[in-house]
Image (cartoon, rainbow, N blue to C red):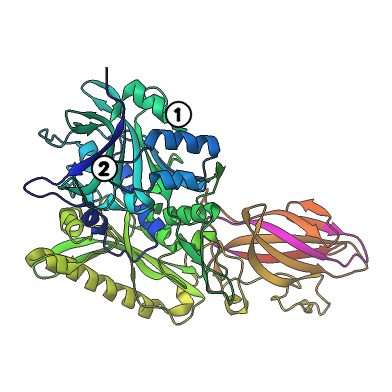
Amino acid sequence: MRPQPRWWSEPVAATGSAKADGVRKQLGTPRMDPLTVLVRESAQNSWDAAVPNGGVVRYGIDLSRPGPEQLLRWRSLLCPEPEGTDLGVDALFGSGHPVMAVISDRGTQGLGGPLRADVALAPGADFVNLLRNIGEPRDRPVTGGTYGFGKGVLFTSSGIGTILVRTRCRWEDGLQTRLIAATLGTRFQRDGRAYTGRHWWGEVLDGVPDPLLDAEADGVADFLGLPPMHPGETGTDIVIVGAALGSIVGDGDDDEERPRTVRQAAEHLASAMMWHLWPLMLTDDTGVARLQCRVTADGVDVPVPDPVDEPCIRPFVDAYRALDTAPTIVRRRRPATVLGRLAIRPGIAPIHLTTASLAAPFTGPAHHCARMRGPRLIVDYLEGARPANDAVQYGAVFLADPEHDRVFADAEPPTHDAWVPDKLVGEARSIVRRAEAELRTELTAYVDRHGDTTLGGGSQPPLGALSHRLAGLIPTASGPGADGGTGVPRPSGSGGPAAAWITRAPRMVRLDGVARIVTHFQVRAASRPVTVRVVTSVALDVGSESTPPVGAAVPAVLELRDEDGRTVPGDTVTVGPGDGRAWTAIIRPAGGTAARVRLFHTEEGDE
C-alpha cells in the first residue's frame, strides 16, 4: 500500500545545504513590479519548454478567489503543516480570502526527466531543475538563462512561499503526469537537527518526497479544480498559493498605496505580457502567433493588448519587423565583429494612457531600444536620446548576433532584465560594453538626423487623438471649400462659401471596445441638395501622402452619424436644401498608420 501524501522538511546535510532564505534572495531586489517579474520568468520557462517544431505555445495566468468548498479541499489536502514549522498554510485557508494564481502552458514538453536530483541528469531534466536543484544551467541552446534562480519569483509571489505543480511530460516511452507541492519557508531547528526551510508535499518513499503520478495526480488536479489537460496533451500548471498581488497608488491627490484587486492585478499581468513578450505574440504570414497569451480574473477573460494596435508600443513592432528588411548592422571595429542588428522606427506619442500602459517600463513618449537575443524575449528597454517635442516618439529594437548569444546571456542577472558588463571579464565584457555604446550613439544620431518633424511623420500608430500641436502632421481636409479645421467656413475658389468643412480634427476613441478614428464636419444649409464624401488616406509625412501598395490596408470610413442619431453607412451623404447639421465620420484605422481626412462636396447643378 502506497503511503498517504504528506509534508516533508529537508534537513541540512552534514556537508551543508542551500537554505530557503538564500533561494528567495537570489532575485535580489528587482526594479520591476513583482507581477511583471512573474510574467517574465514564468513565460520564459514556458517558452523554453516549447515542443520542438510543435507550433504554438499557449501561456496563461488565471487569478481567482476560491469559494468555501474549494478552500476546504485545499485545506484538507495541504494540512496539517510540517511538524515544528509555521508555514501559514492553515491560517491562509482559514482566512477565507486567499488568491490563487494558476500559471499554465500547453504546447510545451512539461517538466520531464528523472524525479530525483541524484540521478545522472540527461538533457531535459526540467523537473528536478525547477523543483529540487538551485541555479542549474539550462541544457538547451539559445534559451532564457539559468532555470534555478529565476524560479524564486514563483515562491516569493506566494504569501506563504508555497506552490503546487502539476505537469505532464514524456517519460520512458510514455506520458506521465506528476503533481507535487513545494514551500520555501525559513530555516529552523527541531529535536537538535537543523533544517533548510525547504519543504515538499508528496509521497515520501525511503525518506524522499516524490510527486504523485498519473491517475492519482490527475485525480488531485481535478479535485482542486486545476485547468483541464486533454488526453495526450503535455504541459504544466503552477499554482501560486495565496498569491501576493501588490499595490497601486491612489488617483489624484491621494498617493496612498492600496492593495490591488484581482481585476487590477489581472490587467497589470496582461499589460506586462504585451510589453515583455510582444515579439513572440506577433502573427506570422499565416495569421498565427507563436505565443498565445491569456489572463482571467475570477473566471472572466481580461484582454491582453495586441501590440500591433497599441500606439505606446507600435514603433517597436515596426522596428522589429524592419530587422529582416532594412537593419543597421552594429559592429565593433577592433577586433572587428558583428554585435547584432538594429532598426529604429518613428511614431506619434499617445496623449491618453490606457490599461495597456499599466506595466510600461518607462514613462512618457518612447525613446528607447528594446534589447533581445535569441529567444526573442525582451531583456530591457535601453533609454536613448529624447526628441525635444513630446508629441513624437521612436522605438528601436536590437537583436544580439547569434555568435554572441551566450555572452549576452551571461551578462544577465537572475531576473534577465539587463546586460551588466561588470558581470563579465575580458573579451565578453568588451562585447557587451561596446554594444551598449554603439546603440546609444545610433539613437542619438537618429534623433539629430531626423529632428522632431520627421520623427512625427513616419510609420505612425493609429492615433487620431491629436491636439493642435499635431495639426500639421495630419491635415484634416482639402478639396472644394474644405477647411483646415478652424470651424469657420472658408470661401471656395469661386468666391462662394464652403458647402462643408471640418470642425474638429481626427482623434482616436474606443467604440464598443474597438479603436476608431472620428472626425466632425459641418454641412452648410444651402438652397440646393449637397452631397458630401469623406475621403481617407494614409499620412506618410508632413504635408504629403502616398498611394499604398496593392493590397495594403488603408483607413476606411465605416459610417456617418448626424447630431440627431441618424446613421448613413459608407462615406457619402446627401442632404436636402436648408439641411445644415453637424456630422461625425467613424473611420476604421489601418494598421500602424495615421489617417488623412478630406471632404469633397458637390451641390446639385455643379459641373
- Read off the residue under disc 1: 223
Decide which of 32, 219 is in the foreground and name it. 219
Q: CA distance from mark 1 to mark 2?
A: 22 Å
Span colored in magenta: 574-595
* Residue 224 in view of the camera: yes
Q: Is residue 432 left or right of residue 350?
A: left
Give residue 62's mark: none
To which residue does mark 2 refer?
Answer: 199
Q: Say which label, 1 or 2, has the lower sequence index.
A: 2
Q: Position of residue 338 (x, y in %)?
A: 17, 61
Dot 1: what SS? Answer: helix
- Residue drawn at (59%, 57%), measured in percent from left and top? 589
What residue do we see at 29% from left, 47% from top? 85
Outermost residue toward the front? 191
Q: From the viewer's perspective, tell me whether residue 168 is left or right of residue 426.
A: right
577 inside magenta stretch: yes
Nearer the observer, 550 or 273 = 273
Label 1 crowd (10 A; few <14 / some 14-19 / many >=20): few
* Residue 358 image offset from top left, x and y in percent: 49, 62
Number of numbered discs visible in the structure rendering:
2
- Amino acid type of disc 2? His
Q: Quadrant of the N terminus?
A: top left
User: What amino acid is found at the position of numbered circle 1 in the picture?
Assistant: Phe
Image quadrant assignment for residue 116: top left
Residue 411 painted magenta: no
